[in-house]
Amino acid sequence: MEYRKLRVIISGGGTGGHIFPALSIAEKLRELNPETEILFVGAEGRMEMEKVPAAGYRIVGLPMAGLQRRLTLSNLALPFKVLKSIRMAKKILKEFRPDIAIGVGGYASAPLLWAAGRLSIPTLIQEQNGYAGLTNKIVGKKAGSICVAYENMEKFFPADRIVLTGNPIRKEIVPADEAMKAEAMKFYGLDPLKKHIFIVGGSLGSGTLNDAMKKWITDGCPGGEDAEVIWQCGKYYKPQIDGFMKEAGNIVAGIQYSDFIKRMDLAYAAADVVISRSGASSVSELCAAHKAVIFVPSPNVAEDHQTHNAMALVNKDAAVMVKDADAAESLMREACRLVTDSSRIAELEKNIALLARTDAAMDIAKEVYRIAR
């Protein structure tokens, strides 16, 4: 198939779970035709305004904001921000003249895709989670194609426009072979004769996962005698963890921690068991890496969608879940038990591998070409 040059607007963001799939889609479209022109539209002050230019793409910001769940003065300004964002979105669309507008969820995609629909520009949305976000539920009613990562999404979107594609992920995330595992051991300075647990709390970190680790360390790391731990504590929590680890002293000899993981592919490769939140991108990467994982869904997300994401795997015996409220007491005990159970690890790895969709970006790109004008 010949992939012609397109003019594409991609809108949305707010979190890495929206931004990184958007960048993967853009990368695939550019790969299919390097002359394709791509413009991102984000929300002013959100992380996409930094991450997208860093990846080499142009982005325009809208003054869009979300509705606060508590009564605040900022909610009174929201209608004015929405109207201004819609006016700006129409102007951007008329000037850029895209063949298609793609929404990945987040504040900015609502006015952009609504305006695109009014101007008869084809639209596509990509829903990363097992429980659709509010923005995508609204704009999905008019979208020409709805690319989803989970089954049974008909309760949120018109069934005849749903395409099961999976979530686009970083191309370096693959199942580790022996050479990659050896590279991971060397990179992180690990003992290949020991078992390894990787705890990842996201770029800002997870207070729950950090508290579970601190309690385990304070208790003397029970059950972890033959294990080493890679602990990503997050930038926000790093100073606090520095002080805690200094006080803990010799007991943490088998634990290395950092605010950020530079080589996520090698961290996955090193791990026998991964402990993670269950954001959409994390779930998709763990499926692609074929990892035995314990999910601890964050309760601080809209519609509790991380629990929906995790349960989609737990129900297929492809993951283990520990509730956020139970993590301090039971998370590390569960992890230490699992990391020594080779047959259970093999079973989880086999089942999660069946859920991997490594061609998601290409499948979404095909949908883009199918409906682009």
Image (cartoon, grey):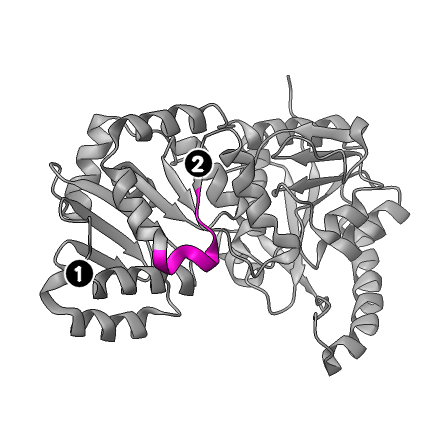
Q: Is residue 117 above or below residue 158?
A: below
Residue sticking out furthest to the bottom:
73
Q: Position of residue 117 (x, y in %)?
A: 86, 45
**Circle 2: element type:** loop
Q: Does residue 345 sit above or below 78 in this rendering?
A: above
> Residue 319 appears at what percent x and percent y?
44, 36
Query: Could you tell me residue 43's position as x and y percent?
Result: 66, 63
Q: Is residue 2 left or right of residue 159?
A: left
Residue lying furthest top? 1
In the displayed structure, 52 sits above or below 155; it is below
Q: Decide: few, some or many residues near mark 2? Use Cα within 10 Å; few <14, some 14-19, many ≥20.
A: many
Q: Earlier in the sequence, mark 1 or mark 2?
A: 1
Camera-nearest residue between 354 and 118: 354
x 56%, y 36%: residue: 312
Determine the residue positioned at 51% across, 56% down.
Answer: 298
The residue pinned by badge 1 equals: 220
Q: Residue at x 41, y 62 (%)?
A: 208
The answer to whether residue 133 is magenta is no
State the predominant SS element of the stretch in magenta: helix
Residue 5 picture quarter: top right
Quadrant of the frame with the N terminus: top right
- Snapshot quadrant of residue 35: top right
Q: What amino acid type is highlighted by mark number 1?
A: Gly
The residue located at (72%, 80%) in the rendering is 72
Residue 242 % position (x, y): 24, 71
Question: What residue is disc 2 on?
Answer: 319
In terms of secondary structure, where does tag 1 sit? loop
The quadrant of the image that shows the C terminus is top right
Residue 149, picture quadrant: top right
The span picked out in magenta is 321-329
Task: Please state which of the two labelled residues, at mark 1 or mark 2, is closer to the viewer.
Answer: 1
Residue 22 shows in this picture: no
